[in-house]
Image: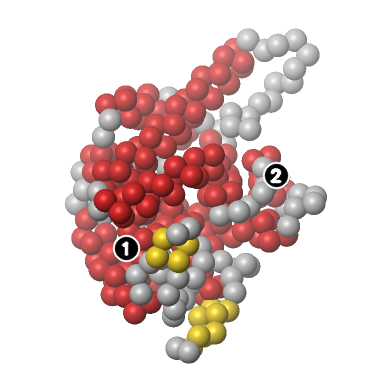
Amino acid sequence: MPDNISILLSRYRELNLQDVLDHERFNEYAIVHHSSSIEGSTLTEIETRLLLEEDITPKCKPLTHSLMVKDHYAALRYVLEAAVTKKAISVDFIQQINALVMKNTGSIYNTVLGEADATKGMFRKGNVSAGGSYFPNYDKVIPYTAELVKRLDENLRKVRGDEEQLKLSFSAHFDLVSIHPFYDGNGRTSRLLMNYIQAYHGLPLAIVFKEDKADYYLALQETRKQEDMQIFYAFMFGQYQKHLEQEITSYNEAMSEKAEPKKGKGSGYSLFF
């Protein structure tokens, strides 16, 4: 893990940002906003917050995008609550995450092997490709996912220190999205599994930023092509550094404004919007 991330984590913890009013809530909104935007949502950060806080649906935006955001938030809350109880990672757990992600936007797929209801977290029963990438045959999904779950369950309580714990979360993210076990929602489910492992270990949650979508896809593709996890680790540590820097900067700026209020401005402020 880069030394600068160790320094940033120390600064983040010294500031006790987890105890700052509304920090966790706004951080969750940011995770949902960026993850949903990567998958096609057009809601802005403000629209995301208003939807989740006040149930205000943005004008002139597809209803599907609002449903994506609300479902993603429900799935995030589910994994964070599961982290508090140290819920074991299982195939059912991963399927439940996906079922929540796809609850109101999933389709039913009819195949020669039977029906697959995306709203219930059912595994795909056909082969898929996305963005020029081809994923394992459908008959590999169950054994590959079971093997991933076994590895994660064995290592979840063993990993020690920030670097090992973060790498476990990043590898879980990469492995699940590379198996691509579902017809839809694979990216969101994989990023939520990553967040679960981070929350399990009390780490700040990672975000893949929407503006870095192209680099994200490239990192996934190159990691598979070169069979080198260091490529994806480097990308994710870069995203983690970016997130921590933004959080710390936002907090320091807010504290500065609070200490020196400007004439005519109200006393209320938001750290992240």
Q: Position of residue 33 (x, y in %)?
A: 58, 46
- Tag 2 near tag 1, CB within 8 Å: no
Q: Position of residue 249 (x, y in %)?
A: 50, 22
User: Dot 1, how many residues are within 10 Å of its Cα: few (below 14), some (14-19), or many (20+)?
Assistant: some
The residue at the point 64 percent across, 40 percent down is 45
The residue at the point 44 percent across, 49 percent down is 217
Mark 2 and mark 1: Cα distance apart in space: 34 Å
User: Dot 2, how many residues are within 10 Å of its Cα: few (below 14), some (14-19), or many (20+)?
Assistant: some
Quadrant housing the C terminus: top right
The residue at the point 66 percent across, 26 percent down is 269
- Viewer-proximal residue, 109 or 248? 109
The answer to whether residue 144 is above or below residue 66 is below
Which dot, 2 or 1, sits closer to the camera?
A: 2
The answer to whether residue 256 is above or below residue 246 is above
Indicate left or right for 256 with 160 as reference: right
Give whichever of discs 2 and 1 has the lower sequence position. Answer: 2
Quarter-of-image position of residue 257: top right
Q: Disc 1 designates what residue?
A: 88
Where disc 2 sits, the SS reads helix
The residue at the point 35 percent across, 37 percent down is 237
Quadrant housing the N terminus: top left
Amino acid of disc 2: Glu
Regarding residue 173, the answer to whether it shows in the image is yes
Regarding residue 13, the answer to whether it shows in the image is no
Amino acid of disc 1: Ala
Q: Disc 2 designates what residue?
A: 47
Where disc 1 sits, the SS reads loop
Q: Position of residue 66 (x, y in %)?
A: 68, 56
- Viewer-proximal residue, 113 or 123? 113
Q: Position of residue 70 (x, y in %)?
A: 62, 57
